[in-house]
């Protein structure tokens, strides 16, 4: 059974749809927030629509092999596809996962290989360019009041030939329940009336696409193998101690290390681990036809290594691929590097318990001090200038907020405003002595950036260092390994560090990046209530705002009410600065067209995460052939 919508290869349709229409549809992004993403490679890690905090790339922007992608659109140029012998029988990509000791348990982030985009299939896939969900394993989603029903496409099989059923999905949700995943704060009950239907009763009405996005995930749990021990535990009535023990054991379990091969229901099956690469081959039970015999993922541990692969024409395609303009100019002509639409803001978080920077006026001083134009020059080219601090990308803010509302937000500017920053510092009770800012106790004001060694993070550090040196603040750049960064962030051991807000198309997803992560609650970021001045009056008398109620209202609001609540959240970000939005950020991908048939980069369907995997899950019009094919001799 083909997907419910097929794609005509050869169409040059591009995304000219109104962002307003997408908003009214309740469109959301299928970034790491859909079902959660552990590591740079995707999966079913922490599943509540919370945006990521960076990526486990080789050094940053070039993350691993996928994530919870999304998909659809109208195709572009493809070609004939599939007749004759492929010019190239192996598609070469890169990964940062070491083949010798990586595993396939997405609930255990340590040494998780990833590759879910390639060996598994999700329930649905979302295209942020068109605002539409595409069928994958699920071919229909309905929501009536508080009852959500997913109908399953029974043409999908595991690599042993057994059909993927609704019971497989239920087992995975039971495991999520055992792990106390946030989705179970919304699910009241779950039933499987037959092999192709799963029904969820949720706690209250939600916007259809918000709930569909939160239920969406890659299906990786299969009965009759290594997952059975966890399926059995998840279906038992465990005591609190037993549950805690099961959680700890599952989150340290290394799946498919001994057997070497995870159960697969996607287009690819793991075939071989070599010393420096992974080899995947076609899943013979995949319902759609494609003519690429083999996918090869070479382990590369640095951005320079990835760029050199591209310059020397050894890279065929990549899911994530960030590159500087100078380096990209050295790429072969048949190599297309493109950035998917901006769907997130880089929004570092400040420790709100810091004696100086925990003060709102001190944070405002920083917002005025940052030169966002300089930031863009110092960071990877996937970023674009953020014109206004609203908590949303600029594109989404223009759709959500009226021109009048945007005009009432405090304007921190895109260029540095040191005079205004100094005014805010003085209002925070600080004074400048001999060019250096001091507290009332005479201590020099200091600031530490704590980040991993990703180009984006180091670009922020470089920019901040320049600002603070000129402004009179003692600045420290603490750049650490990714694992050390993650540990220090979880402990709240920083003044400022990397954070992201994400989810274009619906403001509710941006709230989850700020109001849900316990990791930033550890540093005093307000997540329950906050004192704010009236909208548009930054110097007005403050009053308490219930942030949880605001988030709940956003989940169900429509049209005018949605705009009103989105405006309230924007004011919270703009005034309280729980996080510090500094850039719009897109996701960059890479394809080559000498040996492979892809649509044009500006085709709607190329706005997915990510073409090298998702175009094996879409068929051409009136055909069972996938859109992505090898060119033939």
Image: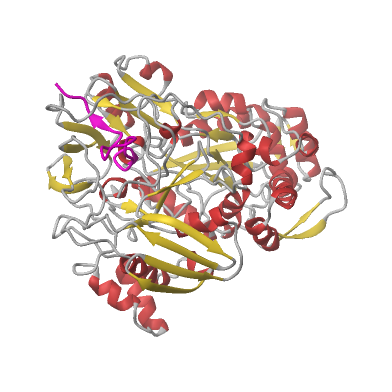
198 displayed left or right of 518? left
> Picture coordinates of residue 192 (x, y %)?
38, 72
Q: Residue 216, can we see it? A: no
Q: Is residue 64 magenta?
A: no
Please report the residue visible at 50 percent of the width from the left and 44 percent of the height from the top: 132
372 displayed left or right of 279? right
Q: Which residues are magenta?
A: 614-633
Q: Residue 626, can we see it? A: yes
Please report the residue visible at 50 percent of the width from the left and 60 percent of the height from the top: 142
Q: Is residue 616 magenta?
A: yes
511 displayed left or right of 183? right
Judged from this view, the residue extending furthest toward the right is: 541
Q: Quadrant of the C terminus?
A: top left
> Which residue is at the front of the view, 448 or 134?
134
Q: Main secondary structure of the magenta part?
A: loop
Question: Image quadrant of residue 408?
Answer: top right
Classify 479 as above or below 328: below
Question: Image quadrant of residue 337?
Answer: top left
> Which residue is at the front of the view, 215 or 621?
621
Judged from this view, the residue extending furthest toward the front is: 622
Tell me the colour scheme of the image.
Answer: secondary structure
Question: Image quadrant of residue 63?
Answer: top left
> Picture coordinates of residue 314 (x, y %)?
21, 25
Classify 557 as above or below 602: below
249 displayed left or right of 382? left
> Picture coordinates of residue 420 (x, y %)?
77, 32
Count every numbered label the image shows and give the total: 0
> Picture coordinates of residue 23 (x, y %)?
62, 43
């Amino acid at each position: 059974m083909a997907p419910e919508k097929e794609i005509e290869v050869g169409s040059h349709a591009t995304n000219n749809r109104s962002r307003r229409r997408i908003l009214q549809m309740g469109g959301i992004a299928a970034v790491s927030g859909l079902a959660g993403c552990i590591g740079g490679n995707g999966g079913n890690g922490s599943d509540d629509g919370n945006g990521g905090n960076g990526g486990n790339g080789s050094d940053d922007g070039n993350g691993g092999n996928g994530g919870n992608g999304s998909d659809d659109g109208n195709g572009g140029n493809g070609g004939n596809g599939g007749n004759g012998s492929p010019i190239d029988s192996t598609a070469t990509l890169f990964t940062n996962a070491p083949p010798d000791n990586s595993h396939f348990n997405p609930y255990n982030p340590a040494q998780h290989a990833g590759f879910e985009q390639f060996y598994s299939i999700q329930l649905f896939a979302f295209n942020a360019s068109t605002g539409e969900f595409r069928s994958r394993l699920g071919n229909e989603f309905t929501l009536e009041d508080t009852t959500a029903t997913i109908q399953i496409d029974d043409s999908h099989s595991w690599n042993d030939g057994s059909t993927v059923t609704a019971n497989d999905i239920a087992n995975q949700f039971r495991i999520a329940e055992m792990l106390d995943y946030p989705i179970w704060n919304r699910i009241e009950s779950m039933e499987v009336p037959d092999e192709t239907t799963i029904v969820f009763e949720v706690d209250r009405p939600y916007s259809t696409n918000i709930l569909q996005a939160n239920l969406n995930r890659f299906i990786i749990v299969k009965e009759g193998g290594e997952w059975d021990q966890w399926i059995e535990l998840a279906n038992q009535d465990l005591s609190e101690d037993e549950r805690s023990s099961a959680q700890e054991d599952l989150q340290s379990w290394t799946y498919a290390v001994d057997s070497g091969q995870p159960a697969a229901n996607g287009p690819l099956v793991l075939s071989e681990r070599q010393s420096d690469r992974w080899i995947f081959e076609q899943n013979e039970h995949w319902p759609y036809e494609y003519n690429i015999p083999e996918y090869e993922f070479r382990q590369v541990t640095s951005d320079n290594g990835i760029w050199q692969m591209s310059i020397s024409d050894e890279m065929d395609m990549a899911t994530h691929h960030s590159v500087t303009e100078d380096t990209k100019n050295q790429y072969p002509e048949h190599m297309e590097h493109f950035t998917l639409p901006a769907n997130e803001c880089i929004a570092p978080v400040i420790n709100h318990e810091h004696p100086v920077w925990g003060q709102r006026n001190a944070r405002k001083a920083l917002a005025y001090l940052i030169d966002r134009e300089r930031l863009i020059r110092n960071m990877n080219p996937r970023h674009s200038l953020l014109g206004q601090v609203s908590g949303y990308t600029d594109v989404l803010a223009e759709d959500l907020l009226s021109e009048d509302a945007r005009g009432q937000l405090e304007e921190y500017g895109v260029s540095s405003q040191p005079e205004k920053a100094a005014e805010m510092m003085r209002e925070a009770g600080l004074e400048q002595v001999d060019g250096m800012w001091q507290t009332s106790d005479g201590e020099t004001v200091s600031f530490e950036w704590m980040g991993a060694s990703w180009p984006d993070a180091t670009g922020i550090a470089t920019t901040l260092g320049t600002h603070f040196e000129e402004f009179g603040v003692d600045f420290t750049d603490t750049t650490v390994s990714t694992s050390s960064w993650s540990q220090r962030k979880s402990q709240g051991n920083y003044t400022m560090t990397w954070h992201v807000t994400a989810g274009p198309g619906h403001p509710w997803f941006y709230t989850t990046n700020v109001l849900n992560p316990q990791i930033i609650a550890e540093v005093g970021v307000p997540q329950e209530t906050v004192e704010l001045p009236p909208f548009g009056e930054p110097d007005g008398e403050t009053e308490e705002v219930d942030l949880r109620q605001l988030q709940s209202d956003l989940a169900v609001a429509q049209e005018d009410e949605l705009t009103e609540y989105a405006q309230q959240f924007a004011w919270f970000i703009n005034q309280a600065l729980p996080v510090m939005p500094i850039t719009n950020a897109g996701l960059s991908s890479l394809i080559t067209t000498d040996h492979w048939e892809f649509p044009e980069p500006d085709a709607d369907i190329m706005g997915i995460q990510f073409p090298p995997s998702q175009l094996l899950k879409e068929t051409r019009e009136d055909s069972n052939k996938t859109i992505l094919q090898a060119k033939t001799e």
